[in-house]
Image (spheres, rainbow, N blue to C red):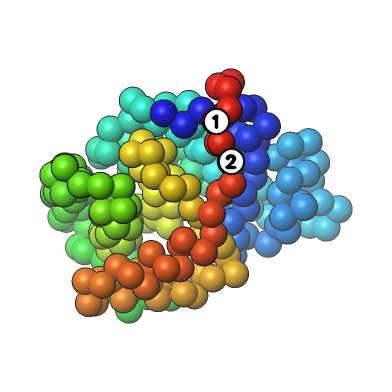
Amino acid sequence: MKKFTKTEVDQLALLLTYSSCKIENNTFTYQETKNLLEHNILPDTYKDTREVYELINFKNVVLYIVENYANLDISIDTIRSIHKIIMENILTNNGVFRNHNVRINNSRTIPYDYSVINYKLEKLNNSFKEEIKNKNKNEIYDEVLKYHCYFEKIHPFSDGNGRVGRALLFLMQLKYDLELNYIDPEFKIEYFDGIDHFLLTGDISKLRTNIKKSKIKVAKNVNTL
């Protein structure tokens, strides 16, 4: 199990919160995000309340995952719990799957019909657990990335799917003791293209190359909280 000091948890929360929300066009700068998360200080310039909740909620989901990852199953219940935290005070139906069809911004992929969400997620979760059996860490890493792509294809919620998917990616990296990487907003177009490329061709190498550009440099033989 990876173990973290409080300082490292704060660093993780800041990096993952800023990057994941920035990918979704949150306008807070890195320093503004740091001031909010660490000192509860808002910028002098106007910011939409939704953006504030996006940052606070994602920090909370990072803390939730760090504290509980060993006991969190890759399941519909976990997915719903993560969405409930991420969309607190943003959606009134946080944690509930969509009941309508949607399109994905910046993507050539068309999500599944809402009527098959439960079936597709159950199938994905079960298939993933079978695929990682008796595999080495590099192979498991690729299976995690494939899961990430398939999750975005399912797109189970009306909003917040990208942030939930990236939170699940972090959860899996911890749970299966993999290299910790994140998606740098600077490479978000390549990130979206990598997901589309896999869903269209079955080739995960493009997404793997993109994500491995950004390594999280924490958790090096440290004491627990």
Answer yes or no: is residue 100 visible: no
Answer yes or no: is residue 200 visible: yes
> Residue 198 placed where, x, y %?
28, 71
Dividing the image into 4 quarters, which one contains the N terminus?
top left
Q: Residue at x 29, y 57 (%)?
A: 142
In what element is the residue under mark 2?
Answer: loop
Neighbours of disc 2 within 10 Å: few (<14), some (14-19), many (20+) = some
> Residue 136 placed where, x, y %?
25, 47
Q: Amino acid at mark 2?
A: Val
Q: Is residue 121 above or below residue 201?
A: above
Q: Nearer the viewer, residue 81 or 74?
A: 74
In what element is the residue under mark 1?
Answer: loop
Neighbours of disc 1 within 10 Å: few (<14), some (14-19), many (20+) = few
Q: Name the front one of labels 1 and 2.
A: 1
Q: Nearer the viewer, residue 100 or 125?
A: 125
Quote the CA–CA distance across marks 1 and 2: 9 Å
Residue designated by label 2: 218
Residue designated by label 1: 221
Snapshot quadrant of residue 28 = bottom right
- Give the farthest residue toward the right: 44
Q: Is residue 56 above or below residue 161?
A: above
30 sits to left or right of 89 = right
Q: Residue at x 31, y 62 (%)?
A: 149
Dividing the image into 4 quarters, which one contains the C terminus?
top right
Q: Amino acid at mark 1?
A: Asn
Q: Nearer the viewer, residue 181 or 19?
A: 181
